[in-house]
Amino acid sequence: TITKRGDSYRIRVSDGYDVHGKQKMRSMTWTPEPGMSERQIEKELERQKVLFEEKCRGGAGACNIKFEAFSKRWFQEYAEKQLRPRTIALMHSLEGRTYQAIGHLRMDKITALQIQSFIHNLAEPGINKKTNGGLSPKTQGHYLTFISDVFNYAVQMDLLKDNPARRVKITKEKDIYTIEEAQKFLDHLESEPLRLQAFCVLAIYGGFRRAELLGLEWKDIDFDKSVVTVRRTSQYTKELGVFTDTTKTKGSQRSLKLPVGVMAILRKYKLEQSKKRLSLGDQWHNTDRLFTRWNGLPIGTSSFSKWIAAYCKKIGLRYLGIHSFRHLNASLLIYNGVDIRTVSASLGHSQTSTTLNIYAHTIAQAQAEGAEAIAEALPLKSSQKSS
């Protein structure tokens, strides 16, 4: 029952009967915020009634459910129905550290400061057992996305009013190759296998994502026009193995015109692959993929990372990961004055705001250097500088 008492409302719920057969009642008081209309009060009062009843039942009200329990519900009710297998597998891999940090806390008691502290700790030395360093900003972002998605679902289900994770920030300073390092990488590449050459020049000059590169098929290469088209991706999960998937967004399906030198390497690589296919005969699986295993089947998603890491070590160059080539590509476009819409389309971002957010520092730096160039070309008099 709901009873109006002055400016507030009393909500009473029957909680069964005691051993003497007497009905047990539980109650709470809710006071509308100043300025709320009658319609708003009516709607919020109904929501408060449902939440309080769920709490009394020991159900999934935000007042008593813990993060770990609710996240498992999120996996079952939302993730498994809406997200891709690769994304679901990634989210599951993040459960351990996340639950250890906040899994035991009630959803309505978790603050933005607690989440920020957890994300900050992920960058501390020793967290990453492979490198004995901290987790990369990209991996930190995966953890924050997981937490935020769980909270968003709670808000969507009217169990919470707010998502504290949306106020948490990650410092995304991208470490990319310099022009000199990129040139050194390319100069030594000539002596490497054609498959490695083809993969690397496409990554550098096209700025493609790794999954997009691995999903390329020969029908996507227009040698006459020097155009490469992205139509699909190649993904991997422990349960499904290597599988073909759609692109990240609709905007990720795009066509890019690449330098003649890149196409020349692709021609040589295609000829080499054709000879190998003929030599293997029936053992070859004709998937039409550019990058395959020895028998033509799609290659694993981590293979090129290992090869490029070994190559960088051999030539005395730091290894920053395959995605660093994409950042290098974007940075070169920005520094050469290409407009942000073109850069965004080239990278396959669905919105220019995504490009602006990721490369805000690069854009600002390019603008600053542009201003300096103008100042050098049109120097001011000393009196004007001081004023």
Image: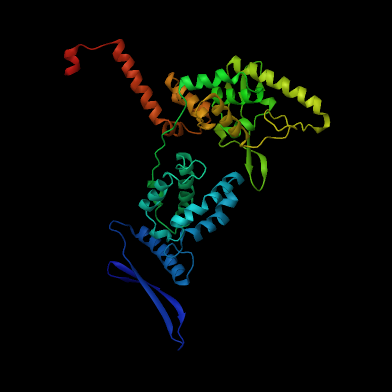
Residue 277 coordinates in the image, percent (x, y): 78, 26
How many marks overall? 0
Residue 260, percent across and down?
A: 60, 14
Give the left or right position of residue 356, taking residue 184 as reference: left
Residue depicted at 17% across the width and 18% down the height: 386
| In the foreground, 57 or 328 | 328
The image quadrant that residue 244 belongs to is top right
**Rendering coords of residue 300 (x, y %):** 65, 37
- Pick whichever, 371 or 309, lies toward us: 309
**Residue 296 in sight in this render:** yes
Quarter of the image with the N terminus in it: bottom left
**Observer-nearest residue: 123 or 372?**
123
Please state if 35 lies on the left or on the right of 93 as rendered. Answer: left
Outermost residue toward the right in this view: 282
Type of colouring: rainbow
The C terminus appears in which quarter of the rendering?
Answer: top left
Residue lying at 40% horizontally and 55% vertically, measured from the top left: 161
Residue 309 percent coordinates (x, y): 56, 31
Residue 11 vs 182, above or below: the answer is below
Q: In which quarter of the image is residue 367?
A: top left
Q: Quadrant of residue 178?
A: top left
Q: Is 144 positioned to the left or the right of 238 in the image? A: left
> Up-down: is 349 above or below 98?
above
Going 43% across and 83% down the picture, which residue do you hit? Answer: 23
Can residue 231 be seen here? The reply is no
